[in-house]
């Protein structure tokens, strides 16, 4: 634990960095150290792991708070916080991220009932979120999430009345939940109706309340819910699980569970609709002479032939290697590969000599022999 680097330092951001800055820094650092682009480089691999670990924590509001307060000890399985540490169980604080995200499945939040009426009422909708990887969003996955919701009380089955008793019809409103009042005013007699005060508009009275729920007929419970994330979903979109929200009142149906999907940025790929974008480094020689290169895709590596004289910034299309279309059984977007030409570093003497002969053949002026600075430079 002691030799663990500070997560902010790992990503190269300030402690006050915004979510967007952290996301950007993560992509940059992860890309620079990605194993696919640096095969057999153990140092890169270790750094890549470290970067992912740092992002895992700093991209999560709760975990970041914990880290800011307790440092690495907050996540030490042998530390004093017990498994998971405090406050990690579920998705604390629903809401608060409501309007930032779009909502593909419609499912508005207009479930506001006129408060003053009796009879069954539909339960409220609950919001939750789930984080998936770039590939999981592309191909779909199943995720278990923890939510807290209101469920019908198992002891009284939602009636609120203790065992052996049942709710009684309210004598004031005869079970209608509303009462008419007659008022004499200077304009004459005005009749109006309002919620019955005695029963609170429910039309029923529980004289002997259920001890488990205190007569409310419902209790708060933590539930594990399995969320099927459809292939092709994008960051910020919401999945509606009908009837998985809060219990209704007086036998009304359950509300919905609205799960917003957060897609973790990929170190190599970027997404634009159903297209996957990738910047692929090739060497000068490969670009000049043409080459068969291995290109990462979300399906794994594929071979791509780049022709002789390929210029930096050239774009190649890999058909059907993009993101599957959401809610469609077939069809995928494409992947676009932008070529980046890299300049070799730390060349051996023989390699430099070979490059010098090339330069001479091209009549190019280059530094002859190793200069003081170009010779043994530490990386
Ligand atoms: Zn009960
Ligand atoms: Zn009443």
Image: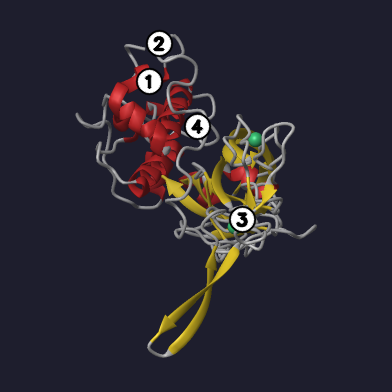
Mark 1 or mark 4: name the one nearer the start of the chain.
Answer: 4
Left or right relative to 248: residue 128:
left
Residue found 36% across the figure and 12% down from its top: 1
* Residue 353 shows in the view: no
Question: What SS does tag 4 mark?
Answer: loop
Q: Nearer the viewer, residue 242 or 230?
A: 242
User: Pointer 2 and pointer 1: residues touching (CB < 8 Å)?
Assistant: yes
- Mark 3 within 8 Å of ligand 2, using the beta carbon: yes
The residue under label 3 is 202
Residue 44 screen position, x and y as percent: 44, 27
Which residue is farthest left? Answer: 372
Q: Nearer the viewer, residue 132 or 182?
A: 182
Which quadrant of the figure has residue 346?
Answer: top left
Mark 2 or mark 1: name the one nearer the start of the chain.
Answer: 1
The residue under label 4 is 38
* Marks 1, 4: nearer the viewer: 1
């Amino acid at each position: 634990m002691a030799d663990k680097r500070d997560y902010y330092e790992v990503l190269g951001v300030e402690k006050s960095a915004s979510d967007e800055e952290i996301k950007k820094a993560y992509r940059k650092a992860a890309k620079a150290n990605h194993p696919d682009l640096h095969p057999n480089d153990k140092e890169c691999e270790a750094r890549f792991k470290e970067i992912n670990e740092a992002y895992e924590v700093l991209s999560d509001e709760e975990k970041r708070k914990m880290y800011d307060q307790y440092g690495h000890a907050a996540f030490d399985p042998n530390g004093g916080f017990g498994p998971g540490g405090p406050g990690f169980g579920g998705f604390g604080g629903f809401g608060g991220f409501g309007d930032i995200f779009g909502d593909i499945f419609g499912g508005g939040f207009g479930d506001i009932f006129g408060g003053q009426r009796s009879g069954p009422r539909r339960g409220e909708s609950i919001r939750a979120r789930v984080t998936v990887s770039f590939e999981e969003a592309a191909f779909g996955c199943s995720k278990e999430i923890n939510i807290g919701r209101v469920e019908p009380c198992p002891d009284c089955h939602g009636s609120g009345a203790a065992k052996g008793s049942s709710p009684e019809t309210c004598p004031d409103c005869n079970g209608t939940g509303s009462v008419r009042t007659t008022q004499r005013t200077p304009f004459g007699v005005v009749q109006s109706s309002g919620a019955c005060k005695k029963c609170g508009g429910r039309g029923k009275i529980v004289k002997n309340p259920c001890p488990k729920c205190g007569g409310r007929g419902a209790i708060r419970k933590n539930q594990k819910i399995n969320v099927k994330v459809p292939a092709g979903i994008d960051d910020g979109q919401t999945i509606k699980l009908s009837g998985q929200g809060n219990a209704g009142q007086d036998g009304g149906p359950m509300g919905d569970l609205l799960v917003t999907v957060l897609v973790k940025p990929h170190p190599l790929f970027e997404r634009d609709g159903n297209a996957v974008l990738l910047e692929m480094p090739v060497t000068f020689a490969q670009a000049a002479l043409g080459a068969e290169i291995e290109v990462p895709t979300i399906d794994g590596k594929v071979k791509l032939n780049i022709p002789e004289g390929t210029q930096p910034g050239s774009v190649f299309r890999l058909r059907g290697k993009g993101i599957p279309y959401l809610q469609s059984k077939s069809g995928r977007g494409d992947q676009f590969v932008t070529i980046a030409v890299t300049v070799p570093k730390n060349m051996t003497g023989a390699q430099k000599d070979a490059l010098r002969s090339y330069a001479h053949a091209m009549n190019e002026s280059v530094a002859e022999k190793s200069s003081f600075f170009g010779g043994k430079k530490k990386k």
